C-alpha cells in the first residue's frame, strides 16, 4: 500500500505548511 504511505507524507507536509503559513492565504 504505497499510496497510503504517500498520502500520509502528503498530509504531514500539508500540516507543516499550514502550520508555518497563515491559512487565510490562498497562494500556497
Image (cartoon, grey):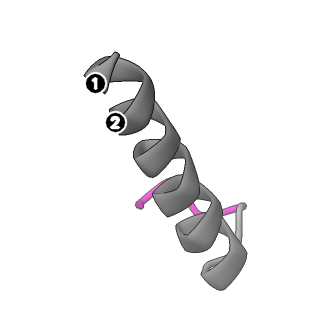
Q: How far apart are marks 1 and 2 (CA)?
A: 6 Å
Q: Is residue 8 left or right of residue 20?
A: left
Element type where label 2 sits in the image = helix
Nearer to me, 10 or 1: 1
Residue 18 location in percent, x, y?
64, 66
Residue drawn at the location 51% of the way across and 40% of the way down: 8
Residue 2 location in percent, x, y?
28, 24
In the image, residue 25 above or below residue 4 = below
Which residue in the rendered view is the most extreme toward the front? 1
Q: Is residue 8 left or right of residue 6?
A: right
Q: What stretch is highlighted in magenta?
A: 24-28
In the image, residue 17 above or below residue 28 = below
Q: Residue 28 carries which label?
A: none
Residue drawn at the location 42% of the way across and 60% of the way down: 27
In the image, residue 1 above or below residue 23 = above
Number of marks present in the image shown: 2
Which residue in the rendered view is the most extreme toward the bottom? 20
Which residue in the rendered view is the most extreme toward the left? 2
Determine which residue is flagged by label 1: 2
Nearer to me, 25 or 5: 5
Residue 28 location in percent, x, y?
41, 61
Element type where label 1 sits in the image = helix
- Mark 1 vs mark 2: in front: 1
Determine which residue is flagged by label 2: 6
User: Does the CB distance between marks 1 and 2 fall below 8 Å?
Assistant: yes
The N terminus lies in quadrant:
top left
- What kind of secondary structure does the magenta stretch mostly adopt? loop
Amino acid at each position: 500500500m504505497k499510496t497510503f504511505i504517500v498520502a500520509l507524507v502528503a498530509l504531514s507536509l500539508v500540516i507543516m505548511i499550514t502550520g508555518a503559513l497563515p491559512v487565510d492565504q490562498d497562494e500556497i
